[in-house]
Image (cartoon, helix red, strand yellow):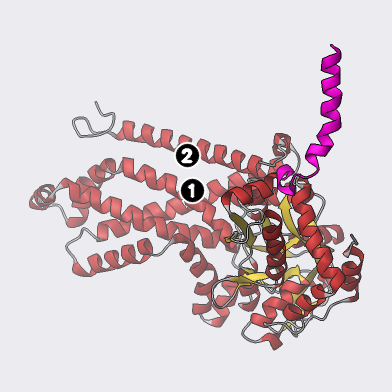
Amino acid sequence: MFRIIGLAIAALLLTPLAGAPAAAQDDSPVLKRIKERGVINMGHREASIPFSYIGSDGKPIGYSMDLCMKIVDRIKDELQAPNLQVKYVPVTSQTRIPLMANGTIDLECGSTTNNLTRSKQVDFLAVTFITGTQLASKKGSGIKEIEDLNGKSIALSLGTTNEKAVKAVVQEKGLDVKFTMVKDHPQGWLALETGRVDAYATDHVLLFGLISKSKDPSQFQVTGRFLSYDPYGFMVPRNDSSFRLIGNTVLADLMRSGEMAKIYDKWFNPGPTNINMPLTQTLKTAFEVQALPY
Amino acid sequence: MQYNWNWGILLQDPYFGWVWSGLGWTIATACAAWVIAFSLGSVIGVMRTTNVAALRAIGTAYVELFRNIPLLVQMFLWFFVFPELLPRETGMWVKRDLPLPEYSTAVICLGTYTASRVAEQVRAGIESIGQGQRYAGLAMGLTPAQVYRYVLLPVGYRIIIPPLTSDFLGVFKNSSLALTIGVLELTAQTRQIEEYTFQGFEAFTAATALYCLVTFIVMTLMRVVEHKTAIPGMISLEAK
């Protein structure tokens, strides 16, 4: 009897000691599966300019991709696996959450709004960008705010936070706006370019990106107040603090050292697609706030 | 798998209503498209079996064009490219004032695509009868139109009921591609529910069950039709 209690106490006392030297991957299912496969599956977008999109050589590039590669480097160190392969998995706004929930992707590097409903299924890393819903329309259309769309039509991308935001405002104000649902940003843009709709609403940064890639950028304008607040974050699988900690440590390091701002300038100021969006005060503050110390 | 299941979401307002409205649009799209597919497909199929070279050429060209382009691409072409090819005013009308633009476009696209498949079934049905009956009909003094009306088509249609069932089912399943041009049918509503609640697995399970239910009903109906129209003595599934 006493022996058993004694053993139990000894076991209790020894447990933290035995646990301490163990590497992070032991309590992280995601790190464990990455190590076992020797591959990290990275979800990326195909047309989220300039966050994550297919470059001219057919490989995904962008602001989010650059930051994610820093996280991958840290994972390589952590697992002592310098030969870790990165497998790119294209995702869309509809597939990203199921693919993360079912374990197909280990890290999503795109332009995903971090919100509380989504946090029921996935976890998010630190906020890397802040945007909101605005309207793109043709110059001379007289559209400034969403109220100007009364009796007109707008394209919305299925399954985005923008769709919800615009529909909520339209309903609240009792406006008569015709919605044309599209499956992705390029199609929404095509609907606007061909005159099928009067406006297209999505995150303002994506609108600038779409304009910068359009045939005649001088023809379009981005207007209106922010109809939603959309902080972007990278998605990681839920309930894996060790894995999330690695990601957040890398981002905090980058924010603290000022390297984050440099990577930002590379893609946005003016950026390869001439998007020309200097670092805003809000985002600068967000970087400062999230640069947690050791 | 890291996932919080919540089946109750499917019964909650407004998601419950979305699923049913989606099912309604799926059925409306598929049935309207099938009317086009069956009527147009029959005409094209008959054209391919006539003795008039010009009609045969038109029929063949139609089938080759519509059957060989992926349906997804056709949806895109009808919705975005077709209005641009029209005169400016008409194009603007199609883009702006056409009633239910997404739905009408999807029905036309799906109907004309499926028509090419129906046409091939109809042709196969007529050709399987053999030239003998055609000549016999003509020898009895029937006009070519009468030969089709009274001899070839009544038998031809009966022969192709099983493959036509597949195409009828295909119309329901292919109608999900209408979501790419913004028709809020069953699959689109499912995605919508997923994006609002992030309970995608539940929503897609419900959609799968509903698609199965619809196709099962169609299959049963077609089997009844096949049974009722069977010609005694002819090779048919349950003919007696």
Q: Position of residue A270 (x, y in %)?
A: 75, 85
Residue B223 at least partly seen: yes
Which contiguous range is marked in magenta?
A1-28
Q: Main secondary structure of the magenta part?
A: helix
Residue at image location 70% in from the left, 88% down from the top: A218
Determine whether the residue tagged by mark 1 lies in a helix, strand or loop. Answer: helix
What's the amino acid at mark 1? Lys
Q: Position of residue A263 (x, y in %)?
A: 76, 76
> Pointers 1 and 2 in contact (CB under 8 A)?
yes
Residue B42 at least partly seen: no
Labels 1, 2: one chain: yes
Q: How many marks?
A: 2
Left or right of B160 on screen, residue A223: right
Asked whether B233 falls inside the magenta stretch, the response is: no
Report the chain holding disc 1: B
Asked whether A9 falls inside the magenta stretch, the response is: yes
Please say if A244 is above or below A69. Answer: above
Residue at image location 83% in from the left, 32% down from the top: A14
Which of the 4 image quarters holds residue A253? Answer: bottom right
What's the amino acid at mark 2? Thr
Determine whether the residue tagged by mark 2 lies in a helix, strand or loop. Answer: helix
Residue A232 bears which disc, if any? none
User: Label 2: how many residues lie within 10 Å, few (<14), some (14-19) or many (20+)?
Assistant: some
Circle 2 residue: B215
Q: Position of residue B194 (x, y in %)?
A: 68, 48
Circle 1 residue: B173
Q: Position of residue A187 (x, y in %)?
A: 61, 69
Outermost residue toward the top?
A: A1
Please say if A270 is above or below A29. Answer: below
Front residue of B55 and B217: B217
Instruction: Give the CA separation, mark 1 to mark 2.
Output: 9 Å
